[in-house]
Image: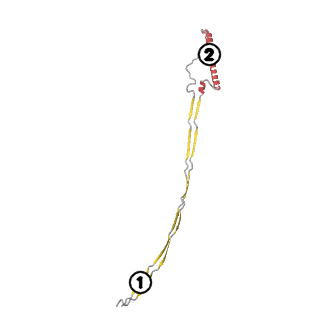
Amino acid sequence: MAIPQLTMQSTKAQISITTTLPVQEIQQRPADLSIQQPKADLRIETIPGKLSIDQSQAWADMDLKPISKRIEEFAQQGYSDWLEGLSRMAEQGDQLMRIEDGGLPIADQAKENSEDPMLEFNIGFVPSPFSVKTNFEPAKINIDWQVNKPVIKATINRPQHSYKPGEVHTEMKQYPTLSIQIAEPKNNQLK
């Protein structure tokens, strides 16, 4: 008996995949930054020092006086001399009123009125020590300042983002096939 033979031929299915890659772009601009630093406000006020020198006493010691001072001194000296003369004349008048008490009041008065008084002199310094008076007021400085804070302005720039998604296309490149053939047996093979 002859058994027919089956022969099968098949082809596999093949899929074709086409891929487009995604595209992503991100751009980040730096922030816009503005910084300003105002200068500090500084104010300096100076009151200058003051030096005063009074040398009027030194000039007076050297007999270099202003005319107003001389007039004042002459007036005082004249008044003092007038009082002294008045006192002397009153005393001498009293002595003459009592001439009967004895003595020589007229001769004594003549001698007293004709002689200059004895002048006294000792060591002197011209001008006298410490006759120049000085006074000094030191300078004053007032410093005032105001610190100004910096002015900072910042603007944030958002990122620029673009995205194009990828694509995947699939299709059948080759469909599967199956072919079956029956081959008749040859008679001489089986007996």
SS of the residue at dot 1? Answer: strand
Vertical side of 187 occupied by 135: above or below: above
**How many marks do you count on the picture?**
2
- The residue under the point 58% across, 40% down is 46
Residue 48, image quadrant: top right
Give the amino acid type for the residue marked by disc 1 in the picture. Answer: Met
Vertical side of 189 occupied by 169: above or below: above
Residue 1 image offset from top left, x and y in percent: 36, 91
Q: Residues within 10 Å of mark 2 (few under 14, many from 20)?
A: some
Give the amino acid type for the residue marked by disc 2 in the picture. Answer: Arg
Q: CA distance from mark 2 to mark 1?
A: 181 Å
Q: Residue 12 or 105: which is nearer the viewer?
A: 12
Image quadrant containing the C terminus: bottom left
Residue located beneath label 1 in the image: 8
Comparing labels 2 and 1, the label whose residue is closer to the camera = 1
Badge number at residue 88: 2
Q: Is residue 8 left or right of residue 88?
A: left
- The residue under the point 56% across, 33% down is 136
